[in-house]
Amino acid sequence: MRSAIQQMRLGILGGGQLGKMLLVPAHQWSLSVSVLDPSPDCPAAKMASHFVEGDFDDYRDVLSFGKELDLLTIEIEAVHVEALEDLQSRGVIVRPAPSIIALVQDKYRQRQLLYERGFPVPRFGLLEGHASSLHHLIQRKNLSLPCIAKYPRGGYDGRGVFVLSQPDQIQDLPLLLEEMIDIHMEISVLVGRNASGQISVYDPVEMVFNDDSHMLDYLIAPACISGGLRHELIECATEIAHSIGLEGLMAVEFFVDKRGEIYVNELAPRPHNSGHHTIEGAVCSQFEQHWRMVLDLPPGSTALRSPYVATLNIVGPADFEGTPQYRGWKELLAQPDIHVHIYGKQQSRPNRKMGHITVLGSSRQEVEKKITYIRSQFHIEKAHIK
Ligand code: ADP
């Protein structure tokens, strides 16, 4: 690594909102960061030191982007792993490692590795070859119908996940089948680890999903859980980070069932939307922490700046597709400790992530009340452009 970090040529694959928010602390430290994204209108394009239009899942685009860099990181997992491996063999530092990115691109491989290393996961099995082997697999893996079915590759935000009740629902294979957990709570733990093995962990976050879209609706930190459970979740996330040799930041998503048992659902080795509250709500934001971890700098404090923090996800309304106009956000700015983030996407689409709003408060009730107020004030409408 070049000794002066400001001299390093850094790069991010992906220029969405996570890329944009990664560029904020990068600017603070005067880091030079290039961004690769297929869309010149993407949220991060204007803020990057250098923007390159290209496909992060294309071998040639990733190689030609990365070979000019000293260190490459990601804000999205759907990237071309072989190109990253080749860049690594040419001396480019890739963090998180391509092997970790490959692991999380395949939900079955991810489950299998976590299971083999003794981490708690739902019972699972891979249905491949022929749908007629369903019965046999279910028996062998101690599963039952209905169960949860997932396409191992390419799904996100709940797309590619469904409840399998009847064998005739099966169309494409392979499918990862899992026992259906009786979920009491979905929790995310953000953990960072640098190349020196130093760890930083944020307090577990409670994620509340929208019943229709299955997307994250809002989150509250700290989660309403016992001290024992909090410790168990933090320890598990930390052990996973060490076990896979993480260099960077990672969200570990957990299920907690009605009996209080924990299960690892999935890993996201990058900043995550369950960590947006850390921008105003924690001493060191997840975005600054990601840079600290990939650059092998000391971990920043993960302490919350207020007893409770909540973040509401703002998604495109169901009833239109087109240029967005934001209504009611000026009223929100008049309130103390409400922080509006608008990602700057040119087009709104149903359920597209368009922004988020973070609130701080001294009690859980207070932040929940503020979230309700924001819902009543803030709207996205279709802009009428003359
Ligand atoms: P994605 O990667 O698309 O977000 P997930 O694997 O996280 O998909 O699943 C999406 C949602 O489906 C989860 O947040 C959870 O609510 C539900 N889910 C997934 N797996 C299970 C399971 N084994 N048991 C019960 N619910 C599940």
Image: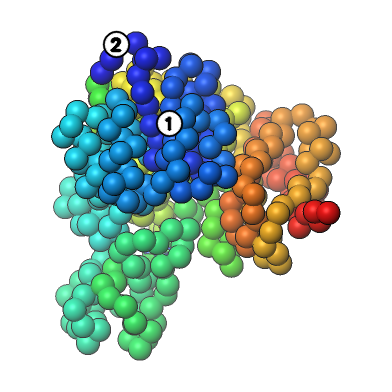
Where in the figure is residue 202, as x and y percent of width and height?
A: 45, 32
Residue placed most toward the observer, 247 or 163: 247
Label of residue 34 in the image: 1
Residue at numbered disc 2: 3
Label 1 neighbour load within 10 Å: few <14, some 14-19, many 20+ = many
Residue at horizontal 26 percent and vertical 18 percent from the top: 1
Q: Amino acid at mark 2?
A: Ser
Residue at horizontal 30 percent and vertical 64 percent from the top: 152
Quarter of the image for residue 110 reads bottom left
Residue placed most toward the observer, 140 or 9: 9
Provide the secondary structure element on which disc 2 rests: loop
Q: How many marks?
A: 2
As drawn, which residue projects farthest toward the top? 4
Q: Is residue 345 above or below residue 222?
A: below
Residue placed most toward the observer, 226 or 339: 339
Label 2 neighbour load within 10 Å: few <14, some 14-19, many 20+ = few
Would residue 119 be seen by someone viewing this image from the given angle? no
Where in the figure is residue 335, as x and y percent of width and height?
A: 80, 33
Is 9 left or right of 114, judged from the image as shown?
right
Q: Amino acid at mark 1?
A: Ser
Q: Is residue 262 above or below residue 132?
A: above
Where in the figure is residue 352, as x and y percent of width and height?
A: 59, 56
Locate ligand 1 by image quadrant: bottom left
Lower sequence index among marks 2 and 1: 2
Marks 2,1: beta carbons within 8 A: no
